[in-house]
Image (cartoon, rainbow, N blue to C red):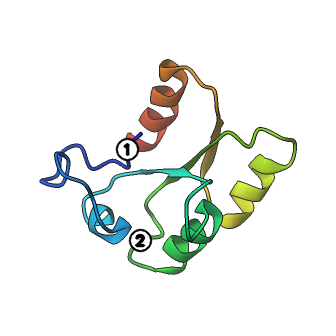
Amino acid sequence: MGTGCRKSPLAESHVMSGTQCLLYSQNILMDIQLPIMDGYEATRRIKADASLRSIPIIAVTSYALSGEEKKARAAGCDDYVPKPFSPRQLLAKIRQYLQ
């Protein structure tokens, strides 16, 4: 799972900071189950920054319970893909935001 850094110099190395990756991102795949700060809060912080809020965020989560998509969208996610998903399904979502 990546965050859109594939074309950047950071693609081959471990990104120590999400902010580093944002400098190169066209979209973000946001895992909701993150340590320290969950994906909902990370999304809220990204969307609160005027220079970053236009980057589409796709929530990717194993929280497939009812209401989770609504919660992700309320946090600012532009889309939602529950796990498990097919690679084709995820790529289709990503392509929507790259056009």
How far apart are the alpha carbons under marks 1 and 2? Answer: 17 Å
Residue ID for mark 1 = 2
- Say few, some or many: other residues with alpha carbon within 10 Å of mark 1 (under 14 / 14 to 19 / 20 or more): few
The secondary structure type at the circle numbered 1 is loop
Dot 1 amino acid type = Gly
Q: Residue at x 86, y 49 (%)?
A: 67
Disc marking residue 21: none
The secondary structure type at the circle numbered 2 is loop
- Say few, some or many: other residues with alpha carbon within 10 Å of mark 2 (under 14 / 14 to 19 / 20 or more): some
Where's the N terminus, which quadrant? top left
User: Residue 40 versus residue 16: which sits nearer the camera?
Assistant: 16
Residue ID for mark 2 = 52
Q: Residue 40 at x, y = what percent?
A: 64, 64
- Answer above or below: position of 55 versus 97: below
Is residue 11 found left or right of 40 in the rendered image? left
Q: Residue 14 at x, y = what percent?
A: 25, 54
Q: Residue 84 at x, y = what percent?
A: 63, 26
Q: Residue at x 74, y 63 (%)?
A: 74
Dot 2 amino acid type = Leu
Residue that protrudes farthest toward the right in the picture:
66
Q: Name the N-terminal-most of marks 1 and 2.
A: 1
Q: Residue 19 at x, y = what percent?
A: 34, 71
Is residue 36 found left or right of 91 in the rendered image? right
